[in-house]
Each structure stands twice: as C-alpha cells, then as structure tokens.
Image (tube, rainbow, N blue to C red):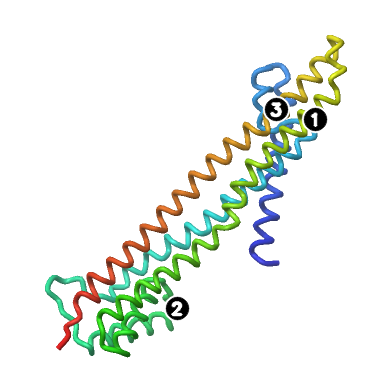
Amino acid sequence: MNNKTFQILISVASAFILWMTLLIFADLSNAIPGLKRIFQLLGGIYGGYIHILIYTAFIYGIIELTNNHKFIKQQYEGFDLNLLPVEEQSLLSSKEVSDIKQSASVLEESGFRFLVSDFIKKTCTQYRNDQSVGESLQMLDAQIDNSKGELESRLEMVRYMINAIVSLGFIGTLIGLSAAIGKSYLARTQEGMPELTGYLNVAFDTTLVALMLGLVLNFFFHRYLENLDTFYVRSKSYIIDNLISRIYVT
C-alpha cells in the first residue's frame, strides 16, 4: 500500500468516525434543541453522506499539508551543518570551494541529506567546472527554482481538495433543495412542515460547513506557502552571502 492510498483510507475512516460521533451527540442532545441543531448542522444527521465527503477532503488536505510542513521544517536543520563560513571578511579560494563541496558530499553519503547541502554542493561543482562566479549564481537560481517548483507541484491535490470541499457543499445544497421541492406537498399539513424544514436545513448546512472548512484549509495552505517561500529565500541568501560573494578570484 503506497502512502497516498494510506492517507485516503485514514481520511475516510476519520471522516466516518467524526460523522458517527456527531450522530451520537445529536441523539444525546434531544433535550436541548439548540445544541442538537449545532450537531445536525455539522453533519449529525442520518444520510449525511455529503458531510462525510467534505470531511474526508478536509482531513486529507490537512494530512498532506502537515507532511509537507514537516519536510520543510526538517530542511532547516541543513543550516546547522556549518558547511559555509559565517565569519566576517572571510574569503574562499578555489581549493576551499572544492573542500566545501567534498564536505557536503561526505555528509550526504553519511545520510545527512538536506536541500541546502545539495544547493551548496551543486554550486561548488559549477564553480569548479568553469571558475565563474556568475555561472555559479545562475546554477544556484536554477536549482532553487526547480526544487521549489517540485515541492509546489506536490500541492496539486491540496488545491483540488480546497475546490472539492466548496463544490461538495454546493452539491449538498442542490440535493437538499431538490429533495425539498420533491416533498413540497408536505407544506400543506402542519405535521409535514418539520420534515420539509429538515430538507432545507440539510441543503444550506452542507454549504455552510464546506465554506468554513474551505477557509480553514485555505489558511493552512497559504501558511505553508509562506514557510516554503521563507525557506528558499533564506537558502539563497545563506549561499550567496557565505559562499558566492566570498569567492576570491585571482
């Protein structure tokens, strides 16, 4: 079983458990109509399958963002490897640049694989090949752009889930309204009004829940993008300030 399939199964199972919990609390709160209505709004109704799908998409999106955030957080450890000199007025000769590349390679072979060390190694390799600071800077820019693009491409499913949550909310509304229209004859009797109102409640509850969860997922999505941008800006500044700008060209 691959990681994506496992995440989907976890999301479905968690959403189903959440739905069952809401059902139980809704049944237990019969004596408190206001509280019962809140649980029903959140999906604590029999037949709340759209709510299950909405919660599944939300949980899957949160899991994806959490995993990506952990990866970026781990990458910050690469700055603690002390591969580059940080002392003021420190210059680097061609041999010292080669030594830095060798140190980065040794660390990677030892299992310390970080994006920063990879950027440093490839920048040093470029300088060793053509002895050009300008070409080395271009190599660094290309590596950072490619790496950032690859990580951003992993967010396509999260983007899809954000859109899917809102779409599912509107689908739930259409289903509820359709059911209410089909049962419109219930409006003729006082006994049928609660059932008709129930269909209308479901219709608008799904959209409300979807919009709220969509806002929450969107917030965490953009927080991750902010952290991603911050990491790459720091990586570029770190390498330019402590490697490229220190190379002493004779």
Tell me the crowding category of disc 2: few under 14, some 14 to 19, or many 20 or more residues within 10 angstroms, Cα based: few
Give the number of the disc on residue 46.
none
Where 246 sits versus 65, above or below? Answer: below
Kind of residue at badge 3:
Gln
Residue underneath mark 3:
40
How far apart are the two marked residues, 2 and 3, measured between alpha carbons?
A: 51 Å
Q: Nearer the viewer, residue 28 or 191?
A: 191
Residue farthest to the top?
190
Tell me the crowding category of disc 1: few under 14, some 14 to 19, or many 20 or more residues within 10 angstroms, Cα based: some
Residue underneath mark 1:
178
Are dots 2 and 3 in contact, CB under 8 Å? no
How far apart are the two marked residues, 1 and 3, measured between alpha carbons?
A: 19 Å
Q: Nearer the viewer, residue 93 or 46?
A: 93
Q: Nearer the viewer, mark 1 or mark 3?
A: 1
In the picture, residue 168 is in which quadrant? top right
- Indicate the secondary structure of the residue bearing disc 2: loop
